């Protein structure tokens, strides 16, 4: 608003946002600060959480290869999910963007609609499909491959995660493709560029920001997903999220759970910030070149 | 426009099948007359749907979810309208920080929010309270409401407001009679998106619900980790059907692709 010169309207935006700000201070900032404090406290099996300051929970996580392994597994599962989402989501978004009118919006909805269905329902659906007598194994038998154990393996977790995350990749790629004028592609083709050259020199640079921001979201959400590894990974295939769940609700070692949760949060934020830096760097380079 | 090639068509078909398969299988298995999770061939039965309605824990959780999601979506919209006006229409110090804070539940994993709120609730003695559970849901769904409110304000033609002001209408009247009605599609879309996200929320809720306040997705998660029978398929099928109805309404109201694609930016 331009008429923000007098004193009363200077405070208007603060008054307007005060209720939301108050709630977020109470329910986001305060609990995160409390959890950070909690992660520096000692836990005793008999007496519970002790007051005082200690680095013990962090030392335990960093020193024990058990935790190291879980973090590593979560990392590669999230990275593999991201890679598959890029390889499937980007071409799919491109195909969608080139479809004819009614089909385009229909299939966009088909790809995006599962976003609105509860993740528990989708995990349950995958456990039906990938089970020992599931549809996929019956298909494998028909094809002569024989039965494969998939449920409670990383395969099942990655497949279901890809299903949940694919819309988060298709959306940003789709959005960046909307800004691409098809005439540019046609011009390149008419100037004798091959399809491959058009892809590499025109389409790919256009969708790179979308791919990067999609990868960021997919990696972050996959690394912290709880329901999918909980239902499809089972008890033995532990990931960071299910580890935190167990520390809080079964072991009751809250300081250790808090330390792991904060580590997860920090890793998530670092990945996002470094991705952003890469993104801005790439933009600056392109601007400099042209 | 160029036609889609055969390779692209096969690829697209496979992706479509992949996206729909888990939802279709759940709906098929829900009609099985057997005691095991199997796809019914020839004979269908509604016994598992009947089982859902006779399962008092599940029904209780459904009503919990409905109440929490309704209250949380309404509160989130009530907070998002003034905050959205501040962000979209005012220049002030800390505007970016405010926007970042209100959108932060999209970046901070729900898992981390869940354990953080569990700590808060434990200190406040608020575990088992529906009110605090609802407030926690308000936090995670406010970003969705806020985005649609800001988008609605950005796309709003301000000449009608200026005309009313120049004709002597008060700011309150202009807001009530012009701004609010023009924002209504965005507000309704934001409410519904917030409602759906609250109704489906499981990762945070798992930490902060107690036996009396367990929401439906949390109850389903707990059932699914213990034993799986076709009743789970029946609940899931009902949820898929409910979501389909909600999607249809949202599409009529606001344009579903606009809401879903708009989620990202």
Image (tube, rainbow, N blue to C red):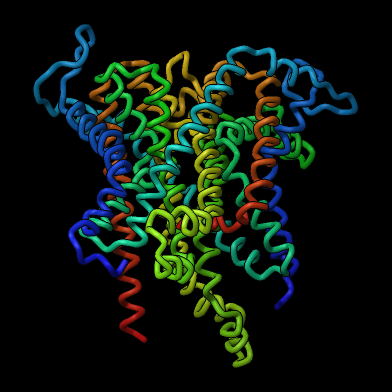
**Which residue is pictured at 32% across the width and 24% down the height?**
B118
**Which residue is pictured at 16% across the width and 23% down the height?**
A41
Residue A60, visible in the rendered structure? yes
List x then y, in percent, for residue B227. Answer: 60, 16
Is A220 left or right of A25, judged from the image as shown? right
Q: A181 or A285: which is nearer to us?
A: A181
| B235 over B157 or under it: above or below | above
**Which residue is pictured at 55% across the width and 52% down the height?**
A167
Q: A222 or A79: which is nearer to us?
A: A222
Q: Residue furthest front?
A: B168
Q: A149 or B256: which is nearer to us?
A: B256
Q: A198 or A227: which is nearer to us?
A: A227
List x then y, in percent, for residue B233. Answer: 69, 26
List x then y, in percent, for residue B43. Answer: 88, 24
Quarter holding residue B254? bottom right
Q: Quadrant of the C terminus of chain A?
A: bottom left
**Which residue is pictured at 44% across the width and 25% down the height?**
B206
Is A24 left or right of B135, judged from the image as shown? left
Q: Quadrant of the N terminus of chain A?
A: bottom left
List x then y, in percent, for residue A119. Answer: 55, 36
Quarter holding residue B124? top left
Q: Residue furthest bottom?
A: A191
């Amino acid at each position: 608003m331009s008429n923000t010169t007098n004193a009363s309207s200077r405070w208007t935006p603060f008054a307007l946002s005060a209720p939301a700000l108050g709630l977020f201070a109470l329910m986001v900032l305060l609990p995160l600060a409390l959890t950070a404090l909690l992660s520096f406290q000692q836990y005793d099996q008999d007496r519970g959480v002790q007051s005082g300051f200690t680095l013990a929970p962090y030392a335990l996580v960093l020193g024990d290869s058990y935790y190291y392994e879980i973090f590593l597994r979560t990392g590669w599962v999230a990275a593999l999910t991201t890679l598959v989402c890029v390889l499937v989501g980007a071409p799919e978004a491109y195909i969608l963007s080139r479809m004819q009118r009614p089909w385009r919006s229909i299939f966009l909805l088909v790809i995006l609609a599962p976003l609105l269905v509860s993740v528990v329902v989708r995990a349950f659906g995958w456990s039906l499909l990938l089970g020992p007598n599931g549809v996929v194994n019956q298909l494998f038998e028909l094809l002569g491959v024989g039965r494969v154990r998939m449920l409670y393996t990383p395969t099942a977790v990655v497949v279901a995660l890809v299903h949940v995350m694919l819309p988060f990749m298709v959306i940003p790629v789709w959005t960046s493709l909307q800004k691409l004028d098809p005439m540019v592609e046609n011009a390149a083709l008419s100037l004798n560029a091959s399809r491959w050259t058009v892809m590499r020199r025109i389409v790919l640079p256009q969708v790179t920001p979308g791919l990067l921001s999609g990868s960021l979201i997919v990696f972050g959400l996959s690394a912290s997903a709880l329901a999918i590894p909980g239902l499809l990974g089972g008890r033995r295939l532990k990931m960071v999220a299910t580890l935190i769940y167990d520390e809080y609700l079964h072991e009751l070692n809250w300081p250790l759970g808090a330390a792991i949760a904060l580590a997860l949060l920090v890793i998530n934020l670092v990945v996002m910030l470094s991705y952003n830096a890469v993104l801005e760097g790439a933009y600056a380079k392109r601007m400099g070149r042209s | 426009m160029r036609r889609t090639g055969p390779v692209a068509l096969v690829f697209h078909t496979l992706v479509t099948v992949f996206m729909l398969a888990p939802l279709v299988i759940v709906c098929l298995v829900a009609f099985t007359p057997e005691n095991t999770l199997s796809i019914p061939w020839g004979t269908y039965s509604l016994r598992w749907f009947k089982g859902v309605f006779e399962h008092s824990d599940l029904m209780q959780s459904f009503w919990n979810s409905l109440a929490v999601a309704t209250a949380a979506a309404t509160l989130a919209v009530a907070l998002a309208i003034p905050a959205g006006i501040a962000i979209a229409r005012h220049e002030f110090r800390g505007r970016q920080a405010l926007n970042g804070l209100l959108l932060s539940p999209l970046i901070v994993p729900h898992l981390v929010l869940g354990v953080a709120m569990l700590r808060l609730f434990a200190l406040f003695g608020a575990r088992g309270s529906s009110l605090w559970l609802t407030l926690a849901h308000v936090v995670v769904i406010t970003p969705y409401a806020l985005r649609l409110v800001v988008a609605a304000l950005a796309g709003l033609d301000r000449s009608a407001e200026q005309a009313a002001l120049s004709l002597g209408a008060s700011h309150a009247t202009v807001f009530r009679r012009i701004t609010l009605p023009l924002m209504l599609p965005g507000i309704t879309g934001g409410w519904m998106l917030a409602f759906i996200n609250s109704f489906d929320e499981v990762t945070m809720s798992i930490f902060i619900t107690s036996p009396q306040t367990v929401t439906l997705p949390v109850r389903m998660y707990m059932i699914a980790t213990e034993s799986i029978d076709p009743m789970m398929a029946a609940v899931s099928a009902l949820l898929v059907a409910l979501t389909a109805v909600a999607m249809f309404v949202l599409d009529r109201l606001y344009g579903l692709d606009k809401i879903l694609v708009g989620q990202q930016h």
